[in-house]
Image (cartoon, rainbow, N blue to C red):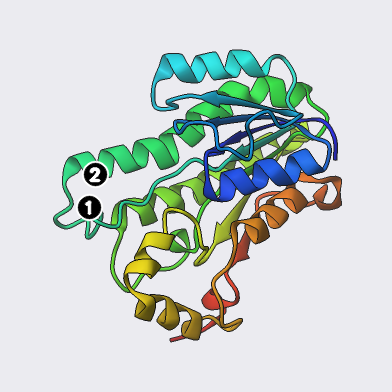
Amino acid sequence: MNGTALVTGAGGGIGLAVTHALQARGVQVTAADLKPVPESLAGLDGVHYHRVDLTDADELSGLVALVGDRLDHLVNAAGVAWFDRDGSALDLPEEVWARTMSINFDVTRRLTVALLPALRAGRGRSIVHVASVAGLRGMDSPLDAYQVSKAAVISLSRSLAIQLGPDGVRSNTVCPGSILTPMVAPLYEASPARRADMEARTPLRRIGSPEEVAEAICFLLSEAASFITGTDLVVDGGWTAQVK
């Protein structure tokens, strides 16, 4: 692939896996997250890690300035799901709703818009937003702030694909199912029965890995997907293919 990429949420989980996958393909990666630099990225050739609070307008602008005038690929992987605080929109605390929407959707929109001049000048001109199957389907137990934020990302991506297509800029989402990320792992550690139930409900009978999602993202960024835009690639082991 080569070229340059910006990956948000690179401090762990899917964002970290994407950063490694792109670096292995020869891409120069600007990696951003609020978390400290992961050990596996420290000193890694071709990766420049920055601690940034993307909900802060000045810090977001500073990151955009670091990227420069040309950018080939953008991966919006930053996101949160607060399983202990999120729930039904009928009685959800306003601060949980607002903060989730800010991190999962508003940051995605603001950063993408700010980077459009650099993406238009780039060679790959490809964007992948990490959404979720929760943005496509309801959940047994509602996490409405998370679900709505991811549905909004999916809708935004489709709109961007239509508007930016004439400029040759592609916009797609990846919608992971149950993936063993640092955000989800504690739930399964606390309840092995919950993990067993999810595995049993997934046709491939297992939980996915961040690396598997990263490979899907790299495909959508690559020239192999040069005629793919406005799509939502589901990476869920077949979970959403079922009617239950």
Label 2 sits on residue: 96
The answer to whether residue 155 is above or below residue 48 is below
Front residue of 184 and 190: 190
Q: In which quarter of the image is the C terminus?
A: bottom left
Residue 64 image-quadrant placement: top right
Q: Residue at x 49, y 67 (%)?
A: 178
- The disc, 2 or 1, on the residue closer to the chain's N-terminal end is 1
* Residue 85 - label: 1
Q: Can residue 171 be seen in this view?
A: no
- Is disc 2 in contact with disc 1, using a CB cutoff of under 8 Å? yes
2 or 1: mark nearer the eye: 1
Q: Where is residue 32 in the image (x, y as percent from the top left)?
A: 55, 30
For badge 2, the amino acid type reads Val
Q: Residue at x 48, y 31 (%)?
A: 36
Is 93 on the left-hand or right-hand side of 163?
left
Distance from the alpha carbon under mark 2 to that under mark 1: 7 Å
Is 235 on the left-hand or right-hand side of 134?
right
